């Protein structure tokens, strides 16, 4: 069973191609119309 799983994972890995461009920054819109751009390098602040 492990050999079958390894073959399956190998076949998927051979088909996956790296992205040409990095992913765009994620943008979140709230129901009140506020727009936030998420920064992966910024740490979250504690809620008050």
Image (cartoon, helix red, strand yellow):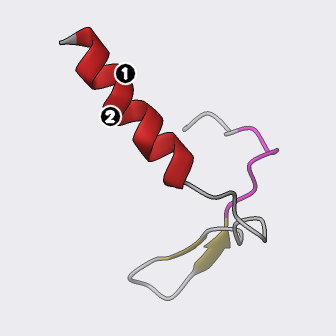
Which residue is found at the position 77% from the left and 65% from the top? 22
Q: Give the secondary structure at mark 2.
A: helix
Q: How many labels were placed on the picture? A: 2
Q: Nearer the viewer, residue 23 or 21?
A: 21
User: Could you tell me how far apart the alpha carbons at marks 2 and 1 are, in whole angstroms?
Assistant: 5 Å
Q: Is residue 18 above or below residue 48?
A: below
Image position of 35 (left or right of 41): left
Q: Is residue 37 above or below residue 11?
A: below
Q: Is residue 35 above or below residue 39?
A: below
Of the numbered discs in the image, which one, if any, rests on residue 6? Answer: 1
Residue identified by numbered label 2 = 8
On the image, the x and y values in percent for residue 44 come to 67, 39
Q: Is residue 40 magenta?
A: yes
Image position of 43 (left or right of 46): right
On the image, the x and y values in percent for residue 39 come to 75, 56
The residue stretch that appears in magenta: 38-43
Q: Quadrant of the C terminus?
A: top right
């Amino acid at each position: 069973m492990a050999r079958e799983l390894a073959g399956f994972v190998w076949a998927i890995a051979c088909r996956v191609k790296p992205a040409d461009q990095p992913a765009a920054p994620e943008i979140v819109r709230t129901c009140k119309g506020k727009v936030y751009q998420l920064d992966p390098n910024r740490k979250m602040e504690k809620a008050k």
